[in-house]
C-alpha cells in the first residue's frame, strides 16, 4: 500500500472506529427465506456493530483462478443453486455496488494482480446472509473471490492487507462453513439443531478451541490435524473465508463465537466475530 492508496481511501470514506470482522456460517440457501435461530443470529450481529459504509464479502461460492473483485454499479442477485422452491429463486437483493471501493481494494492487494470484474454479482453466500442483516439493501456490497490455486497461508497473509478498510467503515464478511461435507449429510436431521456425526462433533470442538485460544496455525494447517478435520473439510472452498477473517485479527482484538451449532450431521453454522 502506498500514499496514493491511503489518499484514495481517505477521500472516498470518512474515518471511523475500526469495524469488526465477521465470519458467517451460511448453511443452506433456504436460510435466506426461512425463520430460524441462525438468521436471528445474523440480525443480532448487525445490531451489535456500527452501520457500515460498505461491505466487502468473501464468499465460498466465488472460487476463481486468480483474485477478482466485483466492480459494477448494480450487482445482480445470483441464484447459484438448484432443486429449491421457486420462492428462493424469486428473492432479489438489489444492493448497489461500489466501483471505487473495488478499485481501492485491488490497489491495497498489490503487487497481487486483482481483476475488476463486471460479470459476477452477489452469489448466495453473500446475499442470503446480508439480506437478514441489512434488509433494506441500502449498503453497497462488493465481493472478492478466492484464488483456488493458493494455499491457506497465502489467504491468511493476503487478508492482512485489507485491514485499512476497517478504519473507513467497511464491514468485511467471510461467508462459508467450517464443517461442510455435503456428501455425508444426514438428511433425516437436516434441520435438527445439534445433530452431528462423531467426526463433526470432534472437528467443531477442535476448531472452536483453536479459535478461542488464538491458535490460528492449527486452523491454517487443517490438513495435518487428523481424520475428523479431513471429513469436515473435504474441499477448501467453504473453509477459506474463515482464514480471511482470522487474517484480519489484530492482537488486542477479541474473538467470539455465535450460531455455534451443528445441523444435518455434517454442517456447522458456527460464526465468528472479531473486534
Image (tube, helix red, strand yellow):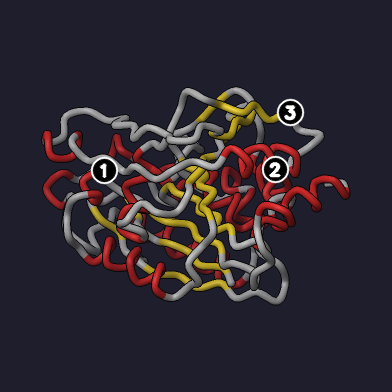
- Does residue 255 appear to the left or right of 179 in the view shown? right
Q: Which residue is mark 1?
A: 29
Residue 9 versus residue 114 in the image, above or below: below
Between the C-alphas of marks 3 and 1, the distance is 31 Å
Between the C-alphas of marks 1 and 2, the distance is 30 Å
Q: What residue lies at 39% left-to-right and 45% top-to-bottom?
A: 95
- Does residue 58 appear to the left or right of 203 in the view shown? right
> Do residues under tags 2 and 3 come within 8 Å of each other at their CB atoms?
no
Which type of secondary structure does the marked residue at label 1 adopt?
Answer: helix
> Do residues under tags 3 and 1 come within 8 Å of each other at their CB atoms?
no
The quadrant in which residue 192 appears is bottom left
Mark 2 or mark 3, whichever is nearer to me: 2
Q: Is residue 199 visible?
A: no
Q: What residue lies at 80% left-to-right and 46% top-to-bottom?
A: 5
Q: Which residue is mark 2?
A: 104
Quadrant for the C terminus in the image = bottom right
- Work out whether mark 3 precedes mark 1 in sequence or the reverse, and give the earlier one: 1
Q: Is residue 159 visible?
A: yes
Q: Position of residue 175 (x, y in %)?
A: 45, 49
Q: What residue lies at 51% left-to-right and 38% top-to-bottom?
A: 236
Which type of secondary structure does the marked residue at label 2 adopt?
Answer: helix
Q: Position of residue 267 (x, y in %)?
A: 32, 50
- Work out whether mark 1 precedes mark 2 in sequence or the reverse, and give the earlier one: 1
- Work out whether mark 2 precedes mark 3 in sequence or the reverse, and give the earlier one: 2
Q: Which residue is mark 3?
A: 113
Which type of secondary structure does the marked residue at label 3 adopt?
Answer: loop
Amino acid at each position: 500500500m502506498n500514499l496514493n492508496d491511503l489518499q484514495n481511501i481517505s477521500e472516498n470514506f470518512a474515518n471511523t472506529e475500526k469495524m469488526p470482522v465477521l465470519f458467517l456460517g451460511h448453511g443452506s440457501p433456504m436460510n435466506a427465506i426461512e425463520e430460524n435461530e441462525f438468521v436471528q443470529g445474523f440480525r443480532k450481529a448487525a445490531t451489535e456493530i456500527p452501520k457500515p459504509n460498505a461491505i466487502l464479502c468473501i464468499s465460498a461460492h466465488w472460487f476463481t483462478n486468480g483474485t477478482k473483485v466485483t466492480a459494477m454499479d448494480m450487482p445482480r442477485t445470483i441464484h447459484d443453486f438448484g432443486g429449491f422452491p421457486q420462492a428462493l429463486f424469486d428473492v432479489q437483493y438489489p444492493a448497489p455496488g461500489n466501483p471505487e471501493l473495488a478499485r481501492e481494494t485491488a490497489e491495497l492487494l498489490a503487487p497481487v494482480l486483482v481483476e475488476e470484474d463486471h460479470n459476477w454479482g452477489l452469489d448466495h453466500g453473500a446475499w442470503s446472509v446480508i439480506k437478514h442483516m441489512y434488509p433494506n439493501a441500502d449498503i453497497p456490497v462488493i465481493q472478492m473471490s478466492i484464488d483456488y490455486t493458493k494455499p491457506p497461508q497465502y489467504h491468511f497473509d493476503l487478508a492482512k492487507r485489507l485491514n485499512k478498510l476497517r478504519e473507513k467503515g467497511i464491514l468485511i464478511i467471510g461467508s462459508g462453513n467450517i464443517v461442510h461435507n455435503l456428501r455425508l449429510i444426514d438428511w433425516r436431521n437436516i434441520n435438527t439443531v445439534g445433530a452431528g456425526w462423531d467426526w463433526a462433533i470432534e472437528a467443531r470442538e477442535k476448531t472452536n478451541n483453536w479459535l478461542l485460544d488464538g491458535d490460528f496455525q492449527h486452523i491454517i494447517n487443517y490438513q495435518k490435524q487428523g481424520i475428523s478435520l479431513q471429513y469436515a473439510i473435504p474441499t477448501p472452498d467453504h473453509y477459506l473465508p474463515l482464514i480471511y477473517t482470522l487474517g484480519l485479527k489484530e492482537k488486542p482484538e477479541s474473538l467470539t463465537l455465535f450460531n455455534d451449532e451443528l445441523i444435518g450431521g455434517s454442517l456447522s453454522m458456527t460464526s465468528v466475530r472479531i473486534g
